[in-house]
Amino acid sequence: MHEKRFEGDIARLRNPERIARLEVERGVTLCLEGAQIKCVLDVGTGTGLFAEAFAKRGLAVSGVDVNPEMLPVARTYVSVGDFCESSAEALPFASAAFDLIFMGLLLHESDEQLQVLGEARRVVRTRVGILEWAYREEDFGAPLVHRLAPEILAELAKEAGFSQCEAIPLTKLVFYRLTV
């Protein structure tokens, strides 16, 4: 399980060029737009890049990552966050525990994408925000074979019980907003 998970230099995840490519502030804004969000779970939090941005907006932040080496790094950036080791396929939280679930470049790495979305649906009250690579061959990011076509993600969201899946193109990525 988790054959496609991130392995490598953790510090590279905070590279300024990578951060710019992720459009962190735009992604956070799209997550919060038109909804009353007070608490967020950052699934696949990594170094806590997005958790940090959510905390700066005054939200209660929790994060999980399957890689235990990521959690101390996330804690250094988000001292007010609650972080624990967990896979996205089996979240250790009660049903409807969070207003928002965020997944930044995680879903394409999952071996069980429908299970990940089903778990997200179980623990969220309002919406899920997903940042993913655009489905095209590029000289950066995941190889095309690991990227998700928008129609596949929309079908998975429907099967997981979401009422709506909206795709919003960003400069290099795609933001998906799933509504309960």
Image (cartoon, rainbow, N blue to C red):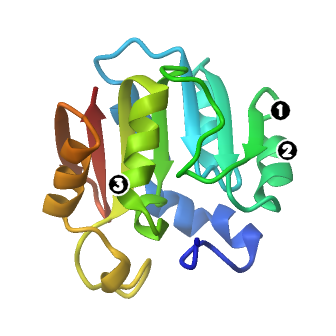
The residue that label 3 is drawn on is 114
Q: Would you say the residues marked 1 and 2 are in contact, meaning their CB atoms lie under 8 Å apart?
A: yes
If you read the primary sequence from the N terminus, does the residue marked by circle 3 or circle 1 appear first?
1
The residue at 23%/72% (across/down) is 135
Pinpoint residue 94: horizontal percent, then vertical percent: 59, 24
- Give the left or right position of residue 173, taking residue 159 as reference: right
The residue that label 1 is drawn on is 79
Say which amino acid is labelled 2. Answer: Thr
3 or 1: mark nearer the eye: 3
Compute the Cα span from label 3 to label 1: 32 Å
Q: In the picture shown, does residue 36 fall above or below 59? A: above
Element under disc 3:
helix
- Looking at the rendering, which quadrant does residue 81 occupy? top right
Element under disc 1:
loop
Crowding at label 3, few (<14), some or many (≥20) Cα neighbours within 10 Å?
Answer: some
Say which amino acid is labelled 1. Answer: Ser
Pinpoint residue 151: horizontal percent, then vertical percent: 13, 60
The numbered disc on residue 76 is: 2
- Give the left or right position of residue 12, taking residue 71 as reference: left
Q: In the picture shown, does residue 175 fall above or below 107? A: above
Q: Is residue 84 visible from the viewing direction of this image?
A: yes
- Looking at the rendering, which quadrant does residue 70 occupy? bottom right
If you read the primary sequence from the N terminus, does the residue marked by circle 2 or circle 3 appear first?
2
